[in-house]
Image: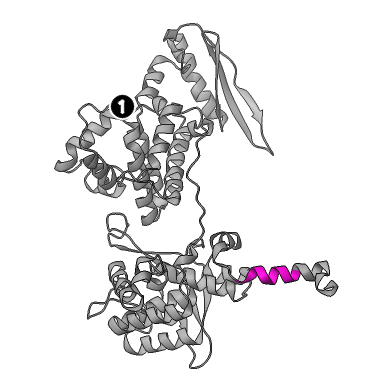
Amino acid sequence: MSSYNVRIHAILTNDLSGKKKSYTVRWKVADKPFRETFATGALAESFRSKLVVAQREGTAFDEKTGLPEPMARELNSRSWYDLAVSFVDMKWPRAAATQRKSIADALTTVTPALLATSRGAPDEAEIRHALYTWVFNKQQRDRDNSTPPDDLTQVVRWLKANTLPLPDVANPATVRKALDLLTTRIDGGPAAANTVARKRAVFYSALKYAVELRYLDAHPMDFIQWRAPKNTDQVDRKVVVNPEQARSLLAAVRKRDPHLEGFFACMYFAALRPSEVIHLRADECELPEEGWGWLHLSGSTQQVGMDWSDSGTSLEDRELKHRAKKATRDVPACPELVGILRQHLREHCRSAHGRMFNAAGARVAPVSKSTYLRAWRQARETALSPAQQWSPLAHRPYDLRHAAVSLWLNAGVPATQVAQWAGHSVHVLLKVYASCIDGQDEAARKRIEGALGTEEAG
C-alpha cells in the first residue's frame, strides 16, 4: 500500500549524556508516525531533504516502511546474500585467519535457512562449498575479480537471486528457523554447545550490522525467546592424565618421534597451547643447568589454510590469546621440563634464535598439526591400555594443557597465579576447571568445623 498523505516534521534534537546529541527525523504517512535517529545533524538533514524532495515531486510513500517508493524498493531489494557478503568484507581486514574461517563457517551454516525458494536449487553440498570457499572468502573473490570459477558460476548466480530480502529475514519465524539450523550438524546429529554459541554470535553480529547500516529498524533476535543448548564449558576430568600416565605418553613419543618429546612436554609441564609451542623460540627459553627455568612467551602461531591468511601461507603468527599485540607471558619450567628442553636444544634445535620445534628432516619449517597429531595417536596406542585408548583420556594433545592446569590447582597454587601462567582470567579458569579440582572438600569441611568450634567441642 502507498499513500500521498505525508507530513514531514522538523528535526528533533536529543540531548544525550555529556555533550553528545542525536537527531531524529519525524514524519507521518497516512497518519502513521515514523522516525529515524542519526548521530549528526548533517545526516539527519540529508535524510529529511530526501523525504521533502520526494513529497514535492508527488512521489507515493510506502505505508509499511514510511519511505518514498523508490527508497522502499531499494530497501526491499537488499538480500541476505548482499548483507552477508558485505559483513564478511567489513570484518576481513581486522580478523585473524582463524576468525575469518569461523565467520565463513557460521554464515555457510545459517544461509540455507534464509533461501527464498528451493526451486532450481543446486545440491546442498554444492551450496555449502560455494559459500564457504568463495562467497564468504573475500581474498578468493578479490583474486578472481568477483568472477566465480566455472564450477561455481551457476551455484553463485542462483544464490544471488534466491536469498530472502532483509525485511523477510527479520521475520521471527525465519530467524528462529535459522537459529534451529545452527543446532544441527551436517550429518543430522546435534552440534556441540560451544559451536552453536560461536555460530549464533556471528549470525547476531551480521544482523546487527544490518541495523547499523539502517537496512533493519531493530535487531530481530532481540525479540525472540530462543534457548541455545547449555554449554558447561567445563573440562571433563576423564580427559586429565596423572603424572605417571603423562610420563608414559612422553616416553612413547621419545621412542618414535624424539624431536617431539619437548613439544608435548611443554604442554604438560608448562600448560602451553599447541600454537604457543609452535611459536616458541630458543632464545625465549631460560634453561639453567639446575633448578627451575622460564619460558618467555611472545606470541602464537596459528595453523590455517592458505586461502584465509594474508601471507598466502598455511601459518599465521599472532599475539598471545586474549593479549595485546606486544604482550608477553612468563611461565615457569620445572626441572624435569628444563632437562627435556636442554636435550632438545642439543639434538634437534637448528638455531639459537629460531623456532624450538621444526619438522623432522632437512626442511626448515614449523612442525605441522598433522605431524604432531599422528605422533600423539601413536603414543596413545603404545602407552595406554586398550580400555584407556577407547576412553577420552588424553584424547587430544590439548588435554595435556588441561592436565597441567588441573595439577597446579590441585597442588594448592593460588588461582590468580595459575591464571597468569596459563593465560586465563581467574573467572574463566575456575569455571572451566571446576570439575577437575580434587581434594578440596575435606579441607573445606575442616575449615568450617574450625570456624564453628566443632573440633574443640568434640
Residue extending farthest to the right is 457
Q: In this view, does 383 lie above or below 37?
A: below
Q: In this view, does 46 lie above or below 124?
A: above
The residue closer to the viewer here, 88 or 321, is 321
Residue depicted at 33% across the width and 72% down the height? 386
Answer yes or no: is residue 146 visible. no
Tell me the kind of residue under disc 1. Answer: Ala
Colour mapping: one colour
Residue 301: quadrant of the picture: bottom left
Q: Residues within 10 Å of mark 1 (few under 14, many from 20)?
A: some
Q: Mark 1 points at which residue?
A: 116
- Disc 1 element: loop
First to last magenta residue range: 439-447
Residue depicted at 36% across the width and 32% down the height? 80
The residue closer to the viewer here, 106 or 381, is 381
The residue closer to the viewer here, 231 or 344, is 231
